[in-house]
Amino acid sequence: MASETEPRKPRDSLGMVLAVLTALIVVSIGLIGYVIYDNSKAADMGTVYVAESGDTVYLDYIGMFEDGSVFDTSLYSVASNDTSYPKSLTFSPREESSYSVFEMTAGLYGESGGTIKGFALGVIGLKASDVRTIVIAPEDAYAINAGMVTNISLNQEIPIVETLSSADFTSLFGTPAIPFSYVTHFEWGWDVLVLSDEFGMVTYKHVPSVGQVAYPFGDPEDEYGPSGWACTVVSYDPAADDGIGKITVHHDITESDVYNVKGVTYDDSVFIVSGYNESAGTFQVHWSNSEIGYNGEIAGRTLVFEIFVRGVVKA
């Protein structure tokens, strides 16, 4: 005889609903907590800092003179584009890999290091994505080293007869001294007559002709790097100065050449025509020396920097 089927227990619907609600609440709390955390993290990551003294500033820059010619930049696209960004006389392009975002400390200048004063102070108050033009007066830029400045007479006098050690003569002229031979002068490019080579000393005589034009400081017609100017022999007096003689050479320099003409000497020293005094009959040249990081084209001048701030990191 078969047994009776046991009655089925009613389902606990209320318990199931509570369980589902509890699970949903736990998941919701977790999601809300994650969203709050993620948003706070994003807010922290996106904080925009305003540069204060001591902060690290990352930026790109274009350094120019007031005429718009570029003397330095952190951007290869600017360095490699001479059409849109004409370059200054002493601009020197580098390898593409050397161009990168510039890192500096806001407010740091002088004996403690850093940049020039006008630049160090000029970035204070800026933040990421700011674009700013900073005009820096000469006193807040690169100071002039008086020892790197030379004044030259427009009508320069040169002794006809000169003396050098035999070693210096060979080094400068590229050949040993042979008495009564002619060689080309290492700077002026005209003929020189060797008079004697005795006791380790060479005596020689300049023999240019009146009206001869020399280019001792480069070729002004060189399309890849013009430099120098014409110098004309205006007189030749072998009896002057007790027989030593005197050559007068006129430099073809005018006011318009100031900061528009550079010169390169026989030993590759570079200078810029930086002044002209018609009443005094002189012009000024400002020398550069890469070994000590001194640039005569930049020293003592107003500088203009176009900058784009990439970021600021608090000190």
Image (tube, rainbow, N blue to C red):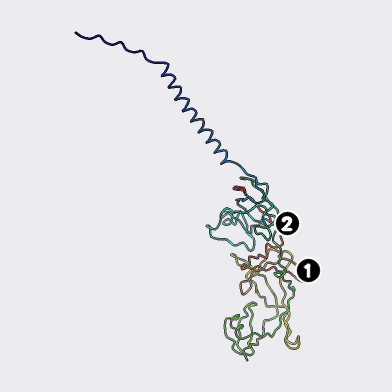
What residue is disc 1 on? 278
Identified at 66% across, 59% down, the residue is 112
Is label 2 or label 1 in front? Answer: 2
Horizontal side, residue 28 vs residue 218: left or right = left
Q: Counting other residues with Cα less than 10 Å from the Cα at mark 1, is it few (<14), some (14-19), or many (20 or more)?
A: few
Q: Secondary structure at mark 1?
A: loop
Q: Position of residue 150 (x, y in %)?
A: 72, 71
Q: Earlier in the sequence, mark 2 or mark 1?
A: 2
Identified at 73% across, 59% down, the residue is 139
Of residues 102 and 277, the one drawn nearer to the viewer in this rendering: 102
Q: Position of residue 261 (x, y in %)?
A: 67, 66
Q: Position of residue 146 (x, y in %)?
A: 72, 68
Of residues 120 and 26, the one drawn nearer to the viewer in this rendering: 26
Measure the C-alpha gap from mark 2 to mark 1: 27 Å
When the figure is inspected, residue 57 is found, relative to residue 90, above or below; the finding is above
Quadrant of the drawing holding the N terminus: top left
Three-letter residue code for mark 2: Ala
Q: Quadrant of residue 289?
A: bottom right
The extreme right residue here reads 279
Identified at 56% across, 36% down, the residue is 40
When the figure is inspected, residue 156 is found, relative to residue 109, above or below; the finding is below
Horizontal side, residue 238 vs residue 98: left or right = right
Q: Quadrant of residue 194?
A: bottom right
Disc ID at residue 137: 2
Q: Secondary structure at mark 2?
A: loop
Three-letter residue code for mark 1: Glu
